[in-house]
Image (tube, rainbow, N blue to C red):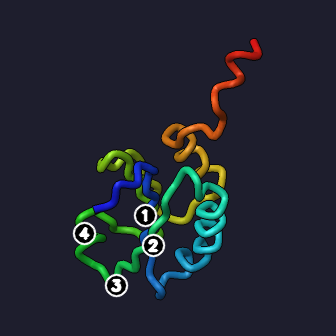
Amino acid sequence: MSTDARPLLVFFGAARSGPARRMESLVAHIARKERDRLRVAAVDIDKQPELAKRFRVTTVPTLVLVKDKRVVGRLDGRVSAPRIEALLAEHLDDDDDGDDELAA
């Protein structure tokens, strides 16, 4: 069991899916960019169909955001970076240390 408190973005795809393959680099970029605030896992639905069923994945690609062991967001189908960032924004902790409030 992981004790990592960062939210988990699960990328459901399949090698046979062109849209999912095209989204892989975008998801990898977000994983690098948000590595201190977000965990990212990739699941091939053909290799792990039981996991895809558990998360009710019917379309690939699908992104599922899990926080505190609960699904808090999802995006079905091929989506843009701004849509993914909007999904993440409300669930990721800020990087700052609160000094902005002191500057006011």
The spot of residue 31 in percent (x, y) is 59, 63
In the rendered view, tell whether residue 26 sits above or below residue 44: above
Say which of marks 4 and 2 sits in front. Answer: 2
Which element type, helix, strand or loop, lies under badge 4?
helix
Whole-Å distance between the Cαs marked 1 and 2? 6 Å
Tell me the kind of residue under disc 2: Ala
Tell me the kind of residue under disc 3: Asp
Residue located 75% across and 12% down the image = 104
In the rendered view, tell whether residue 50 sits above or below residue 95: below
Which element type, helix, strand or loop, lies under badge 2?
strand
The spot of residue 87 in percent (x, y) is 53, 46
- Looking at the image, which is closer to me, 11 or 34? 34
Which element type, helix, strand or loop, lies under badge 1?
strand
- Checking the image for residue 53, the label placed there is 4
Residue located 47% across and 55% down the image = 75
- Residue tagged by mark 1? 10
Tell me the kind of residue under disc 1: Val
- Which mark is first along the chain, 2 or 4? 2
In the rendered view, tell whether residue 36 sits above or below residue 17: above
Which element type, helix, strand or loop, lies under badge 3?
loop
- Residue tagged by mark 3? 46
- Which mark is first along the chain, 4 or 3? 3
Q: Is residue 12 left or right of residue 50?
A: right
Say which of marks 3 and 2 sits in front. Answer: 2
